Image (tube, rainbow, N blue to C red):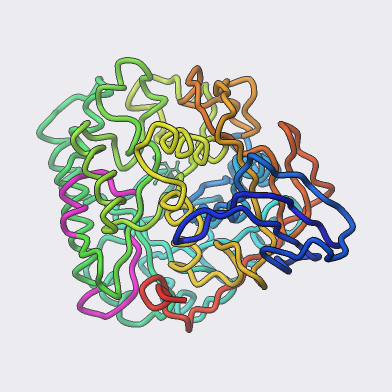
């Protein structure tokens, strides 16, 4: 089956150009295809932009074990709607994905349920080093250096040294320092106000843990990806050109800050916590100047009932896969960034950080994971429209300009004009070529 996407504006690293893209079966077969090339289907994309499907390297899809909040069927549909064609999911499911066997169970669930491509991290514990050393079919190892939702935690220095010294898979971590958090809790005393969340999980907690992880990575010469940077100071300790270190921002740390607690309450309670407007600005700046390379969502849904409990009973986390690309396209329209940057942060860079084969670019031979976006389309985010099982969004009521209109996963259409059109579980397991050496080693491909 050959499909011509005609007159699409495609976004290449050095600019945008209008061409015909042809997909054949799973792959991109031609770019700037000759008009006489025989095809089975023609899609007129005049006036629209064709982007590589988004690779979201940080999501919590809750299956198995927490499927009252989210599951792979709902979440992957939310991804397709949001232009995300590959997700990498975190190990704090129930049971935690901390062995090869449990990883294989999640991969089987992905194959059964997901309409977009999938991958699953293996979680570190203080005593699963042998599993971490031999794990396969995974993008990398996730360490909770600070605790968040669930009970995964490795904060002892010896255990961390061992993980950085003895494993070979790329590493990533939730960086909030447990000692700092405990001291802040003690100093603040009885906690009743949501604003205390950002005082307990404060700037210092984030900086200390991020600095500690970077130090481990540099000493052990081990690839390390800093997740969800929430402070200006972390941006300053991420070198931005060191072969071992990459870093990432999330929409909530770009678009929300502590001033939003008054309006949105526990809906925007997150770990790492929201910080200040100055931190938002600094994180944007770090993306623009290349110290941070990736934008990912940290999609972490809880039910509205759970979120509406009074703080501190309320859990941390918010859903975002459905709206992350639109939020960034809206910023393109506002002039804050350009489309090339969005494609870099959301598609190409995460694919390279995790050595994902065939993803993140529109190039001949790459997988036909594509999203057609209409930069002029205006739409308001509404809770009632959300496909995520939790059924709410912290951006409810926000009008955004620039939306995905069609999404293809490995050449199969999964989303079109507001509807999911996938037939069956169209997602494929992501594959990794870790010998490539990650983001910095592949910069000039
Ligand atoms: O706020 C958060 N919630 N941060 C995380 O790192 C985990 C997530 C969750 O799984 O709920």
Between 335 and 1, the one nearer to me in the picture = 335
Q: Quadrant of the N terminus?
A: bottom right
Residue 341 included in the magenta stretch of the image = no
Image location of residue 364, percent across then percent down:
65, 71
Query: Most extreme residue toward the left, as rendered?
Result: 187
Quadrant of ligand 1: it is: top left
Q: Residue at x 52, y 36 (%)?
A: 326
Task: Work out whether residue 408 or residue 229 is closer to the camera in this orientation and state it.
Answer: 408
Q: Residue at x 54, y 33 (%)?
A: 402
Residue at left offset 44%, top offset 61%: 14
Which image quadrant is residue 68 in? top right
**Location of residue 439 in the rendering, given as x and y in whole percent from the top left corner:** 40, 70
Query: From what the image shows, is residue 26 above or below residue 68?
Result: below
Q: Which residue is situated farthest in the front direction here?
A: 35
Q: Is residue 134 left or right of residue 110?
A: left
Is 225 within the magenta? yes
Q: Nearer the viewer, residue 421 or 58?
A: 421
> Is 226 positioned to the left or the right of 2 in the image?
left
Q: Quadrant of residue 192?
A: top left
Region in magenta = 218-237
Q: State the image quarter where residue 438 is shown.
A: bottom left
Percent x, y of residue 29: 73, 69
């Amino acid at each position: 089956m050959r499909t011509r996407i005609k007159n699409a504006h495609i976004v290449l690293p050095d600019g945008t150009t209008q061409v015909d893209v042809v997909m054949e079966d799973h792959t991109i077969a031609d770019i700037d295809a000759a008009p006489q090339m025989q095809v089975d289907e023609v899609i007129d994309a005049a006036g629209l932009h064709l982007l590589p499907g988004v690779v979201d390297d940080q999501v919590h899809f809750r299956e198995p074990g927490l499927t009252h909040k989210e599951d792979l069927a709902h979440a992957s549909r939310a991804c397709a709607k949001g232009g995300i064609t590959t997700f990498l999911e975190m190990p704090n499911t129930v049971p935690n994905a901390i062995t090869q066997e449990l990883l294989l169970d999640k991969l089987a669930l992905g194959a059964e349920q997901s309409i977009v491509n999938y991958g699953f991290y293996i979680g570190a514990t203080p005593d699963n080093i042998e599993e971490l050393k031999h794990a396969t079919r995974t993008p990398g190892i996730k360490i909770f250096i600070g605790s968040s939702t669930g009970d995964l935690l490795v904060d002892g220095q010896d255990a961390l040294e061992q993980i950085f010294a003895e494993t070979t898979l790329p590493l990533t971590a939730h960086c909030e320092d447990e000692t700092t958090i405990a001291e802040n809790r003690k100093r603040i005393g009885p906690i009743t106000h949501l604003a205390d969340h950002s005082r307990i999980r404060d700037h210092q907690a984030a900086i200390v843990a991020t600095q500690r992880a970077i130090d481990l990575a540099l000493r052990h010469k081990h690839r390390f990806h800093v997740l969800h940077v929430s402070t200006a100071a972390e941006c300053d300790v991420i070198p931005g050109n060191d072969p071992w270190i990459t870093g990432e921002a999330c929409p909530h740390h770009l678009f929300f800050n502590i001033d939003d607690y008054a309006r949105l309450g526990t809906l925007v309670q997150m770990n790492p916590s929201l910080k200040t407007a100055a931190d938002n600005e600094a994180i944007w700046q770090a993306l623009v100047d290349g110290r941070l390379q990736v934008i990912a969502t940290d999609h972490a849904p809880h039910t509205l009932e759970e979120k509406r409990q009074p703080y501190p009973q309320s859990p941390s986390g918010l859903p975002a896969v459905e709206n992350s690309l639109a939020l960034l396209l809206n910023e393109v329209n506002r002039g804050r960034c350009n489309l090339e940057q969005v494609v870099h942060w959301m598609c190409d860079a995460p694919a390279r950080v995790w050595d994902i084969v065939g993803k993140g670019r529109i190039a001949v031979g790459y997988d036909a994971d594509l999203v057609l976006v209409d930069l002029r389309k205006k739409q308001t985010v509404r809770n009632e429209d959300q496909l995520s099982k939790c059924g709410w969004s912290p951006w409810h009521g926000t009008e955004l300009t620039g939306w995905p209109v069609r999404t293809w996963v490995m050449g199969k259409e999964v989303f079109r004009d507001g509807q999911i059109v996938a037939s069956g579980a169209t997602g494929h397991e992501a594959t990794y070529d870790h010998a490539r050496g990650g983001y910095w080693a592949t910069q000039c491909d």
